Image (cartoon, rainbow, N blue to C red):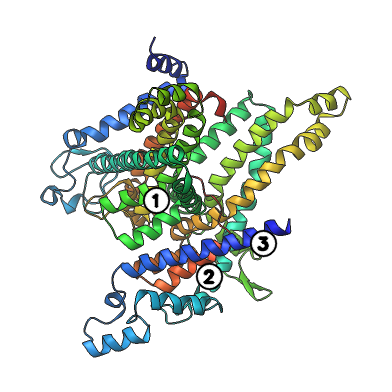
Amino acid sequence: MLSHIVRRVLQSFGVLAVMSLLVFAAVYAVGNPMDILVNPQSDQDEIARATAALGLDRSLLEQYFIFIKHASTGDLGRSFAFNVPAIGLILERMPATLELATAAMLIAVLLGIPLGLWAGLKPRSAAGRTIMAGSILGFSLPTFWVGLMLIMVFSVWLGWLPTSGRGPTTNLIGIPVSFLTLEGLRHLALPAANLALFNMSLLIRLTRSGTREALQQDYVRFARAKGLTETRIVGVHVLRNVLVPVVTVAGVEFGSVIAFAVVTESIFASPGMGKLLIDSISVLDRPVIVGYLCIVVTLRVRPGEAR
Amino acid sequence: MTPAQRIAAEFATSRVALAGFALLALVLLAAALAPWISPQDPYDLARLDLLDSRLPPGARSAAGTVYWLGTDDQGRDMLSAILYGLRTSVAVGFASTALGLTIGVSLGLAAAWLGGWLDALLMRLADLQLSFPSILIALVLLAVLGQGLDKIIVALVAVQWAYYARTARAAALVERRKEYIDAAVALALSNARIIFRHLLPNCLPPLLVLATVQVAAAITLEATLSFLGLGLPITQPSLGLLISNGFNYLLSGHYWISVFPGIALVLAVVSINLVADRLQDVLDPHERR
């Protein structure tokens, strides 16, 4: 077990090193951020001074080694656009994203597993078929379009929920969170539901096929023969065996939920890391782009299947 | 009965799949014929009338033509814009899948056939890439490459190749142990002939299923990236960009500018997925989900 953990940690460092070098080289190749950052009226001297101040006059390799040296102490460089440490900028936005991702995952698990169980137990019933049809739609519908539809229905037509932002935040051990107030929850509802949709569909499918498989197993037949109640058979014998792969997938998918928060945060103008990434890409804010990716890799983003 | 006929007959036994297939045919036809069936050339600025901007569906223009799906902020007929957008989206989806499939399958077959360091290198690379969500890879690539039709195709190919390479390699590793390959080797056929005439055709079923799913995934991903403003430039609007443009007016109740392009996108993606689902049942009975 220990050797396994050590190997995984080393692997993560390997991925981190390769990824940061690739991204660094790639982002380096994209043109000069000075074009965007400096006032176009400034003269050559000013541009040269600003370039040197950001360390952009050095060679790629030099810049990369300086970056690695600083990164090992937790310093990912200063944002070009905001002139504050990139890591601080990202960490400041992180609670919003983690809150959104956690809420989405909770919705996916708390709705997906019971619905999948139902569809697995009664595959031929109207409810079972409806649940499956819904999950196919959940897979097929583009996440961002569903987000727009949610805004249209619940905000514009019905006027029940707000369209953007996080709402008021309260401090929970120094971290600003919005799920403690009703207003914050109202802001969280639509983005979380939007982000949950894909994984809810995935969990419905997994739970359903797991349930159907488990029902054919000898231990379930035996439990029936023993005269156990249906509740006990499903609740103890079926569910417990179904949950193993489901929990694994839910864990693995957390990383891709964070990545897909990029889309949801852009739609709902939620001030999270994903929105920061999009904004940084448009102004070529290298340290923030590289920093975001390093942090997401560190959070162990695992295989994100095609979505 | 040829294998293709058998597959077609089995495919047709599902009514849902047939409906999906019919819908897909309609979508493809609309995309292919867009320049000829659109009521208006949506990108000929001389034909646009700003007085007609943001008209609701069914409204009449000053000139008397009916805008069945309304108009956008520049007075553009939405139906025409959607048909052209669908054309772009579908073209990008199919082109990137075809390219990705070719590159991925070649690399996968090479890895399986040659083995050794090439195999190890390619598979580690694929592992590394698949450990990131595809949208992140595409985002970073587009940040680096910039906007444009060729660039988004490059990004989509880069996202897809690893899936094909892995699937092709796995299938080829199973097939190459079979006797017909031994027989082909014993006949001293050239490597190229064995790989393309004997190995590849037998690896195709799972690849076809995957490629169909990936066309839908590529169309969705392209739409998402365009929606975020990182995909296609405004001169070649795909459905994603139309939806993004309409989003600005959604809050003021002009729903049709983003809802209808969205419905077109959904129809395209759902029809492809329905076909893919059935193909999987027919071609790959062991992998039924």
Using residue A269 as the reference point, say whether residue A200 is left or right of it.
Answer: right
Reading the image, the residue beneath label 1 is: B224
Q: Is residue A114 above or below residue A173?
A: above
Task: Say if A167 sits above or below A62 in the image.
Answer: above
Residue B160: quadrant of the picture? top left
In the orientation shown, which residue stands out farthest toward the left? B46
Please give the chain letter of the residue carrying mark 3. A
Residue to which mark 2 is pinned: A93
Look at label 2 and name its amino acid: Arg
Give the letter of the chain under mark 1. Answer: B
Q: Residues within 10 Å of mark 3 (few under 14, many from 20)?
A: few
Q: Amino acid at mark 3?
A: Val
Disc 3 target residue: A6
Q: Tag 2, which secondary structure?
A: helix
Q: Is residue A165 left or right of residue B20?
A: right
**Residue occupying image coordinates x 40% and y 16%:** B3
**Chain letter for mark 2:** A
Q: Is there one chain holding both mark 3 and mark 1?
A: no
Q: Nearer the viewer, residue B34 or A222?
A: A222
Between B70 and A54, the one nearer to me in the picture: A54
| Marks 2 and 3 in Cβ contact (< 8 Å) | no
Query: Could you classify mark 1 by the number of other residues whose Cα lies within 10 Å: few (under 14), some (14-19), or many (20 or more)?
Result: many
Disc 3 to disc 1, C-alpha distance: 38 Å
Name the kind of residue labelled 1 in the image: Thr
Q: What is the x, y in percent for residue B169?
A: 47, 38
| Front position among marks 3 and 1 | 3
A31 over A200 or under it: above or below: below
Judge by depth and name the residue closer to the eye, B52 or A138. A138
Q: Residue furthest right?
A: A226
